[in-house]
Amino acid sequence: MDINALFTDEGLRAFTATVRDQHVRDAQQYGQIADIVRRRLEQTPIEGDRWMAKKLRAWKVSRQLRAMQKASGEAASKAEALYATYVNEVLALPERRAVAEAKKLERKNGRQAAVGAAVASSLNKTVTALNTPQEQAPGAVPQARPAEFVTPDNPWNQWPMAAGGERPTSTINDYFAKGEQG
């Protein structure tokens, strides 16, 4: 047997079919032999047997052959499982990965398209809001009131400080007027 042939689809299929068929035939033979042994032992008395001794003895002996039949049937199903697992885990894996990658890319593109649409909608609302006619010159930034130069009313700016010229922290009132002056 060429071991490299086992790593191809056709080679493994042929191997598993051969092994499966052999185990199925063995299971059939074990079943037939179990029936023959049981029937023969049921009909063969041994001196000193009691009432059900022949049937019990026949059942005990044929039970071992039935276990062999069951094991061969399980081995045949395991041979099929070997092929199915190999196809699923080895041969079909690259195709499954390609499909998964394509789905992942599709989801990513869908998310990017949704984000792009949301950004475009937001920008459209912003442009629409900025292009609404207002009572200002074109290109001017809308303001609550006209800009004016404000001198702070803080007395700290009028006298120099002793010991290093430190100044207290500024507040908002240092930069903006305290109401309408006029």
Image (cartoon, rainbow, N blue to C red):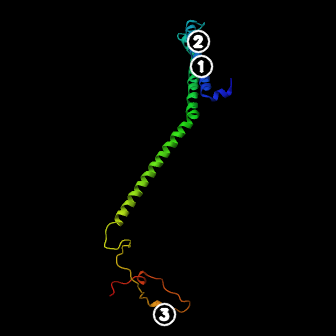
Q: Residues within 10 Å of mark 3 (few under 14, many from 20)?
A: few
Residue contact at pointers 1 and 3, CB within 8 angstroms: no
Q: Which residue is mark 3?
A: 159
Sequence-earlier tag: 1 or 3: 1
Q: Are marks 2 and 1 in contact (CB under 8 Å)?
A: no
Mark 1 lies on residue: 23
> Which callout, 2 or 3, points to the residue nearer the camera?
3
The N terminus - image quarter: top right
- Up the image or down, 161 lies above or below 31; here it is below
The mark lying in front, picked from 1 and 3, is 3
Q: Is residue 139 above or below residue 8?
A: below
Which SS class for mark 3? loop
Task: Inspect the image, locate mark 3, and give the three-letter code of the amino acid beneath it.
Answer: Trp
Seen from the viewer's position, the closer of residues 89 and 118 is: 118
For label 2, the residue is 33
Which element type, helix, strand or loop, lies under badge 1?
helix
Q: Position of residue 138 (x, y in %)?
A: 36, 71
Q: Quadrant of residue 175?
A: bottom left
Is 144 on the left-hand or right-hand side of 163? left
Q: What amino acid type is highlighted by mark number 1?
A: His
Instruction: Say if 147 sits above or below 115 in the image.
Output: below
Q: Earlier in the sequence, mark 2 or mark 3?
A: 2
**Quarter of the image holding residue 73?**
top right
Q: Give the residue type that dot 2 points to.
A: Ile
Could you classify mark 2 by the number of other residues whose Cα lies within 10 Å: few (under 14), some (14-19), or many (20 or more)? some
How far across and how far down the image is residue 44, in percent? 58, 6
